[in-house]
Image (spheres, coloured by chain):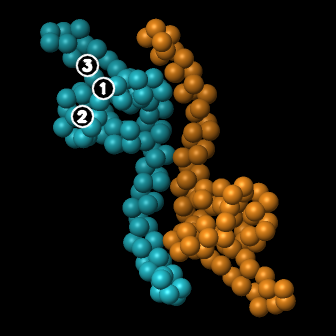
Chain colours: A cyan, B orange
C-alpha cells in the first residue's frame, strides 16, 4: 500500500502503468482497500476503450505525507542505528 | 516499542515505573532492542540501592516525533476512514 501511495503522490495514474512499477499490485488493493478507505478516487472515463484512473484524495495525500515522515526518518538514520548496534555488541561482548 | 518511546518522551524513567504503565515491557526490550539501536540511554547511578534510569537519546526523540506524526494522523482520520468504508460498502452492495 505504501508504494501505491508514493506512486500516486504526483498525480493520477492507470492500473497498467502502476503495475509496471509495483510488483504484486492488484486492482483489488486499489479499490477494495484504498478506495474503500478513502485514500484513492477511481475515475472512469466513458470513452472507447474505457479509461480508468486512480488518484489520491486529500486524505490519501495526507497519509502519504505522514508515512513519508517515518520512511525518510528511517532512511536518514539507518546508518546511525547500524553503528549503534555495532558499538553495543562490542561493549556487551556479542 | 512505540509505547516505550512515548512514555520516555517527557524525560528519563526507571524500569519499575515504566512497568506500571506498559504491559508486557521487559528490560531486554529497553536494553537489547532500544539501547542497542541507539534510541535509549541507560544510566546507572552508583548508590545503594543502585538506581538505573532510561532516557531517550536525540535519535529516540526524533523517532518518537516521526512515529507520532503517523499515529496522530491515524487518530484524526479514523472516523473519516470508517465513514468512507460505509459509503463504499453501500455503493458496492456489500
Q: Residues within 10 Å of mark 3 (few under 14, many from 20)?
A: some
Q: Secondary structure at mark 2?
A: helix
Going from the N terminus, do you reach mark 2 or mark 1 first? 2
Q: Which residue is mark 1?
A: A27
A94 and B35: which is toward the camera: A94
Q: Could you say where residue A64 lies in the image, as x and y percent from the top left?
A: 43, 42
Q: Earlier in the sequence, mark 2 or mark 3?
A: 2
Tell me, for residue A18, which label it has, or none: 2
Residue B23 or residue A45, whichever sits in front = B23
Q: Chain of mark 3?
A: A
Q: Residue at x 25, y 13 (%)?
A: A45
Which percent across, then down, holds residue A6?
35, 42
Compute the Cα span from label 2 to label 3: 12 Å
Q: CA distance from mark 2 to mark 1?
A: 10 Å
The span from disc 3 to disc 1 (Cα, nearest Å) is 11 Å
Q: Same chain, marks 2 and 3?
A: yes
Most distant residue in the right direction: B48
Could one spot residue A7 in this view of the protein?
A: yes
- The residue that label 3 is drawn on is A52
Residue B82 in percent (x, y) is at: 57, 25
Q: Is residue A14 left or right of residue A87?
A: left
Q: Residues within 10 Å of mark 2 (few under 14, many from 20)?
A: some
Q: Quadrant of residue A9?
A: top left
A9 horizontally vs B85: left or right: left
Say if B81 sits above or below B34 in the image: above
Residue at the spot 78% in from the left edge and 68% down from the top edge:
B16
Query: Residue sitting at 24 percent across and 34 percent down?
Result: A18
Mark with earlier residue (3, 1): 1
SS at mark 1 in the image: helix
Q: Are labels 3 and 1 on one chain?
A: yes
Amino acid at each position: 500500500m505504501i508504494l501505491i501511495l508514493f506512486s500516486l503522490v504526483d498525480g493520477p495514474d492507470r492500473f497498467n502503468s502502476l503495475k509496471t512499477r509495483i510488483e504484486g499490485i492488484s486492482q483489488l488493493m486499489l479499490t477494495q482497500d484504498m478506495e474503500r478507505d478513502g485514500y484513492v478516487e477511481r475515475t472512469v472515463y466513458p470513452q472507447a476503450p474505457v479509461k480508468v484512473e486512480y488518484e489520491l484524495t486529500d486524505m490519501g495525500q495526507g497519509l502519504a505525507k505522514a508515512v513519508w515522515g517515518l520512511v525518510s526518518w528511517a532512511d536518514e538514520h539507518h546508518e546511525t542505528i547500524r553503528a549503534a548496534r555495532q558499538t553495543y555488541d562490542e561493549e556487551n561482548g556479542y
